[in-house]
Amino acid sequence: MATTIRDVAKEAGVSAATVSRVLNNSGYAHEDTRKAVLDAIQKLNYRPNEVARSLYKQKSKLIGLILPDITNPFFPALARGVEDYLREHGYRLIIGNSDEQLEQEIDYLDTFAQHNVVGIVASINEPHSDMLSDLNVPIVLLDRTVEELPAVYADQFEGGRLAAEKMLERGSKEITIIRGPIEVRPVYQRFVSSFQVLRQAGVKVHVFDSKLSFEGASKSASSLFEFYPNTDGILACNDIVAVAMMNEAQRTGRKVPEDVQIIGFDDISISELVYPGLSTIRQPAYEMGEKAAEILLKKINQQVLDDLHCQLPVQFIERQSTRKVGE
Amino acid sequence: MATTIRDVAKEAGVSAATVSRVLNNSGYAHEDTRKAVLDAIQKLNYRPNEVARSLYKQKSKLIGLILPDITNPFFPALARGVEDYLREHGYRLIIGNSDEQLEQEIDYLDTFAQHNVVGIVASINEPHSDMLSDLNVPIVLLDRTVEELPAVYADQFEGGRLAAEKMLERGSKEITIIRGPIEVRPVYQRFVSSFQVLRQAGVKVHVFDSKLSFEGASKSASSLFEFYPNTDGILACNDIVAVAMMNEAQRTGRKVPEDVQIIGFDDISISELVYPGLSTIRQPAYEMGEKAAEILLKKINQQVLDDLHCQLPVQFIERQSTRKVGE
């Protein structure tokens, strides 16, 4: 059994409230009482509980981060951005993995709030405004948006547009868009944007569904070319899916980029390391994390935000899974 | 400002201790008092603080997990194993990223202990027994060991041996071992074991250093073949490094596996998705996480552990970055 403030109070022969006063240097405590409390603390190896103190002082330095899937490298990269910025400013980060499940998102919001975090960064799918405003803790959304809350995200429409245009410029004529789950808003936005550009260009377009995870990507990749064997260009909903599709293309005897060009989304670390290197739309994950942390600290310190929403730019990273223009 | 127990007490015209008694259903409180407190709680939208209550009740359901690097997919896989097991048993997991830095490891141990976690799973490099026994919170090490603490890990010596033998069986004669940082014990163990097997076999062996991260791997890969151009087999310290080396081999015009065979370590999700698929030594990351969680809950519930240390088996996963035996 861990030592509690009550054990200390009993050992020192005083009330728990007195122990608390001594710990917090608040209110009056006689020097003898003070000594008795400190002796008891030392004897029992009691660690003055930061949480209990923050109940009174509101000075916990803990921030909670909710991510949808830590096994997708995009999110650890976001997390590193959040963490590095917070650490520099004397805060610590704890992370919860929601698995894109509403119930788990609520669970973590609640856990964080109950355990005295002073702020929350959340990449959650269905922010329920009611619940969020109930939290009594500043929150910043990351890679997700809701009108009335601060949010940091990359320009998904521009990303979707860029991917489609780069593919068209490089000569693909029968393009399959791998659409992720439509309930993940940024993923849906990039899909819609790509789709519009391709339709306007008059090329043949297929839509093929995949989950965003390694397992899901692998599974859907295995049947892509059965459905659409003449695909000569693939726009994938994220880099994991793109790598899975690239693997499948090569496995079925297609050359990348000669027979099939592939463009991913995110620019996770692995995209540079696979062979051929994956051309992709880069979201500045680390910078997004930093920015979200910066905005959160502003909110915690009750500073005025210039803008509620902060949209960061995306860019096309050209590697070897696409041909050079004009080739 | 968040509502505190003091605000509730003031609103209800009672002491904070009385509010606490009502919240915890402990000790006597007159029905009128009880009603006044509950009304105040409702009026102020006060969320009874789970942490403060757990100070008295010792019933927080929060577990802390310390990982060395969440951007290496091996660790999120471990985390998922821990998390899924805990969730099934009504516990929640929060994660801290230590970046393999001792200072940050201590920081998180402290943060978790102070914020009333009931147990800790830690993948930390230099467990200081003093500090760990001071914690007053059950701890299980994961992918790391210390004699006197419960630990779950995979059989690194067997893994190193297997990698070397499989490489030899498949005919490589000039083998470069990519050794990770020697202070990361499991990584060092697999290196030593591979090295011994190769030396005994009398083949030519080089040792080449790399960090374990994406960036580090990419950087060291770029000079591997300048140092050892005749390398025809690579044993990499983890899969990230293996993928980086495979990329470099192909970039410099070498065919995998015809000219250079490559074996990784870990079997992260990406290893199956790259082309050619990466042959590797599989550590059962998810199962390791589950097992650590299981042992931790036993400790929390003061059950007797059969064994302090739990070693899980590794296995060779044969994909396309190695030749078939006899080819």
Image (spheres, coloured by chain):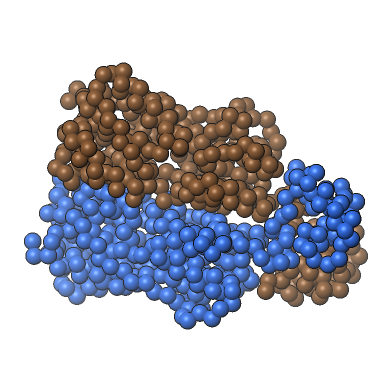
Chain colours: A brown, B blue
Q: Is residue B132 above or below residue A283?
A: below
Mark count:
0
Outermost residue on the left side: it is B327
Q: Is residue A23 above or below residue B157?
A: above
In which quadrant of the rendered image does the N terminus of chain B lie? top right
Report the residue at 45% width, 57% height from top.
B80
Q: Nearer the viewer, residue B259 or A325?
A: A325
Report the residue at 13% width, 61% height from top.
B324
Report the residue at 87% width, 70% height from top.
A14
Residue A134 falls in image quadrant:
top right
What is the x, y in percent for residue B271?
A: 29, 53
Q: Is residue B292 above or below residue A97?
A: below
In which quadrant of the rendered image does the C terminus of chain B lie? bottom left
Q: Nearer the viewer, residue A130 or A17?
A: A130
Left or right of A237 on screen, residue B300: right
What is the x, y in percent for residue B103?
A: 55, 59
Outermost residue on the front side: it is B31
Residue A295 visible, this orientation: yes
Q: Is residue B58 above or below residue B303?
A: above
What is the x, y in percent for residue A133?
A: 67, 38
Q: Nearer the viewer, residue A300 or B91?
A: B91
Report the residue at 27% width, 27% height from top.
A205
Residue B75 visible, this orientation: no
What is the x, y in percent for residue B312?
A: 37, 72
Q: Nearer the viewer, residue A115 or B39?
A: B39
